[in-house]
Amino acid sequence: MPEDWDRAVAVVAHPDDLEYGVAAAVARWTGQGKQVTYLLATKGEAGIAGMPPSEVAPLRMEEERRSAEVVGVHVVEFLDHPDGLVEYGVALRRDLAAAFRRLQPETIITTSFDLTWGEEGPVNHSDHRAVGLAVLDACRDAANGWVFPDAGRRRQPDPFRGRHRHHRRGHRLAA
């Protein structure tokens, strides 16, 4: 992956998704002085069986903040989409586009939105699929000032034009 950028946003559905995916690469990049922000669609409130979501969300959010610090990430933001019920659509795209306009990343990293993890692998979580696909569309949305005009000003020039890279394995780059 090219490393000719200074600011990135890593977008996933749940706390711990980045730790299972790209945390080692993030540590490399922050070690090079690059700024990486974590953006999570949910607070992970449905992630621990036997514990009520009201107790799980703060616990998982704190775990994510602590693990982010270990790899040099100092900003972790959580959107408020419901864990286990993330829906691809306008609301998610708007939230992501607004974050991209505000944070102005040069690179956006997200999870696979394929149906399965590999040809013979297990089915990918529906939240991962929804977030991954919405990230791709939100990159375009963020660059178009006519789409979600109330979600912040688009960046000039369009930072994503001609820079889309799509990696087949594991995580994908959207810018």
Image (cartoon, rainbow, N blue to C red):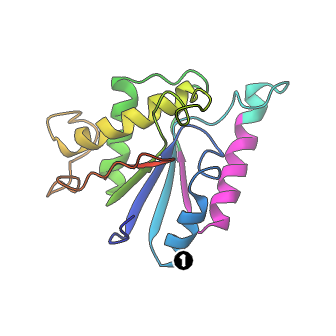
Q: Quadrant of residue 124?
A: top right
| Any part of residue 72 in sight | yes
Quarter of the rendering occupied by the N terminus: bottom left
Q: Nearer the viewer, residue 105 or 80?
A: 105
Instruction: Report the label total.
Output: 1
Q: Quadrant of residue 144?
A: top left
120 vs 61, left or right, is left
* Residue positioned 62% across, 29% down in the render: 122
**Is the residue marked by circle 1 packed among few (<14), some (14-19), or many (20+) residues within 10 Å?**
few
Q: Position of residue 92 (x, y in %)?
A: 40, 30
62 vs 171, left or right, is right
39 vs 144, left or right, is right
Q: What segment is highlighted magenta in the picture? A: 57-77
Q: Position of residue 125 (x, y in %)?
A: 58, 28
Amino acid identity at mark 1: Gly
Q: Main secondary structure of the magenta part?
A: helix
* Residue positioned 46% across, 32% down in the render: 114
| Any part of residue 81 in sight | no
Residue at the limit of the structure toward the front, as seen here: 120
Residue assigned mark 1: 31
